[in-house]
Amino acid sequence: MEYYNGDPHKLMNEMVGLGQKLALKSGEYADLCKDFAAKERDYNIELTIEMVRLKGTENLAATACEKRAKGDRRIAGLRYDRDVSKGIMKACEVAMQNIRTVLNAHQSILAWERKTAEL
């Protein structure tokens, strides 16, 4: 709704639709959180394996092993996938907050309508 045209029924119908969108986004967010956690786990496991391998074969310091391991194309790809997943998850979280904001605005309008109807 771009502006309030004075029709509370239309506003309430829109609120129902927004509630449904919020429920869908909430389910989507749970799936995105699982996906992010799995990608973070995979990245951390592979990073650790590569660091241990480098420490054993090249006898590098731990910090050097970490930097070198993060430069490995495969590890960097896993980190990229993790970071993209995190961004998508955060975007979904922001979308849910935006829906809540619109719902709160609609509730305020309806409360105002009730108050003015009492006068």
Image (cartoon, rainbow, N blue to C red):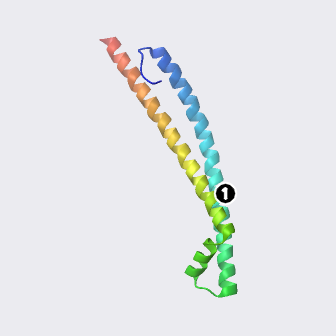
**Quadrant of the rendered structure where residue 53 is?**
bottom right
- Total tally of numbered discs in the picture: 1
Query: Could you say where residue 10 lies in the image, as x and y percent from the top left?
Result: 49, 17
Foreground residue among 65 and 115 = 65
Query: Could you say where residue 24 lies in the image, as x and y percent from the top left?
Result: 61, 35
Foreground residue among 116 and 77 = 77
Residue at (44% x, 34% y) in the render: 101
- Taking the view exactly as shown, the residue that stands out farthest to the bottom is 59
In this rendering, the answer to whether 63 lies above or below 24 is below
Query: Could you say where residue 68 lies in the image, as x and y percent from the top left?
Result: 61, 77
In this rendering, the answer to whether 106 lies above or below 34 is above
- Provide the secondary structure element on which disc 1 rests: helix
Label 1: few (<14), some (14–19) or many (≥20) C-alpha neighbours in 10 Å? some
Residue at (58% x, 57% y) in the render: 83
The residue carrying mark 1 is 38
**Quadrant of the rendered structure where residue 29 is?**
top right
In the rendered structure, the answer to whether residue 8 lies left or right of residue 28 reads left
Query: Could you say where residue 76 lies in the image, as x and y percent from the top left?
Result: 63, 66
Residue at (67% x, 69% y) in the render: 73
**Quadrant of the rendered structure where residue 105 is?**
top left
Foreground residue among 106 and 59 = 59
In the rendered structure, the answer to whether residue 72 lies left or right of residue 63 reads right
Residue at (42% x, 26% y) in the render: 107
In this rendering, the answer to whether 75 lies above or below 88 is below
From the image, which quarter does the C terminus lie in?
A: top left
In this rendering, the answer to whether 116 lies above or below 53 is above
What amino acid is at disc 1?
A: Ala
- Taking the view exactly as shown, the residue that stands out farthest to the left is 119
